[in-house]
Amino acid sequence: MNYKAIKFSRTNQAEFISDLRKRVKTYFDSNEISVYGNATMVTKTVAMFLMYFGPYVLMLTGVITQPWLILLMWVIMGFGMSGIGLSIMHDANHGSYSKNKKVNKILSYVMNLIGASSFNWKIQHNVLHHSYTNIEGVDEDIDPGILMRLSPHAKHYRLHKFQHIYGWFFYAIMTFLWLTSKDFVQLNRYKKMGLIKGQKRTYRSVLIETIFSKVAYYAYALVLPLIFIQAPWWLIVVGFLLMHIITGLWIALIFQPAHVMPHSDYPIPDNIGNMENNWAVHQLFTTTNFSPKSKLFFWYVGGLNYQIEHHLFPNICHVHYKRISKIVRETAKEYGLPYNLEPTFVSAIASHARMLKSLGQIKTV
């Protein structure tokens, strides 16, 4: 079904989001707090960039030459890269990092800086995923192709029986797909869907931007290290691969347990595109929070363990999610709505693994 045909209910518990927005607004107004980033966000930004570029500079300048330390630097860069994506790029692309639109636009391009396309991310994530969460055929986050089945409405293949085993490998190589084919495939698909014009861009300009970004990324992230780092070429390639494996796993293990879970709903529209619930209620039924007590985890993953708050308020910077989560949870309870929560990151991964196994069976869940 065309995404344009999907219409959420305007009457089914529509007062929930209206009431919730008023309460959240009252929280910010009464505490005289901006919904955008603060000093904590700026400090985190500096820390993430240092985690990524610090080891890079140490290797290129010859400060670090021992093989095992070089590999360690690439590993640290992997955590820095995923941290930049989760904590900086994500908020910037949602326009919640800063009140200044230019700052958001500049920081959104760190996606290109780490080898992917900010433009494609905005469409896949902001437009399709956030608007139509867990709706088969529209939400691309649950449509990785035939190799994995992330929705009970997706076609089943025999190999899916083992996806709870091999799926982690495909999560690990996710960023390699971004570096090679995925962005170009997506761009052509979005052109056919008319989504490029909706972003006030032309296909040609985005294509040129994407090609240039990838060439620039490979030049500084792989070619320069091969030239200047005092180590065997294969060691540098291994380090480069390690960096992307870490990044791919972290991104997948943060986003996938938020929606592909045993208690997640996968609502489908009726024959004319109508959904049973309004958009906000739909988010509650399809989204899960996890590990709410870990301050370090919250800091590193950009508050994305509070996915419910993020989906309901993507225009609010993640540094505020922990504070407003109590308001969201209590309001959901008042309206008899779910507030899905996994106590730890480990339990969330375990539940996601069970869901992968369940979806790998022939019967739908």
Image (cartoon, rainbow, N blue to C red):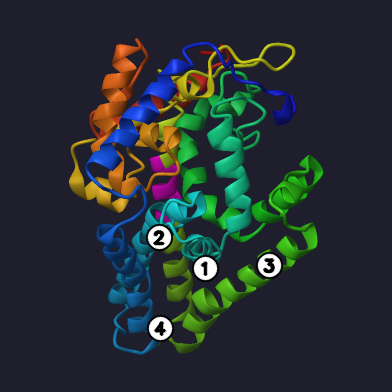
For label 1, count other residues whose C-alpha is less than 10 Å away and answer few (under 14), some (14-19) or many (20+): some
Magenta-colored span: 246-254
Number of callouts in the render?
Answer: 4
- Write down the residue under mark 4: 231
Please state which of residues 41 and 38 is positioned toward the viewer in this rendering: 38
Q: CA distance from mark 4 to mark 1?
A: 24 Å
Disc 4 or disc 1, which is closer to the eye? 1
Helix, strand or loop at label 1? It is helix
Question: Which image quadrant is residue 350 in?
Answer: top left
Q: Are marks 4 and 1 in contact (CB under 8 Å)?
A: no
Helix, strand or loop at label 4? It is loop
For label 4, count other residues whose C-alpha is less than 10 Å away and answer few (under 14), some (14-19) or many (20+): some
Left or right: where does residue 33 sit relative to residue 229? left
- Write down the residue under mark 2: 84
Q: Earlier in the sequence, mark 4 or mark 3?
A: 3
Disc 4 or disc 3, which is closer to the eye? 3
Q: Are marks 3 and 1 in contact (CB under 8 Å)?
A: no
Q: CA distance from mark 2 to mark 4?
A: 27 Å
Helix, strand or loop at label 3? It is helix
- The residue under the point 26% across, 21% down is 330
Q: CA distance from mark 3 to mark 1?
A: 12 Å
Please state which of residues 98 and 120 is positioned toward the viewer in this rendering: 98
As drawn, the label of residue 113 is 1
Please state which of residues 71 and 351 is positioned toward the viewer in this rendering: 351
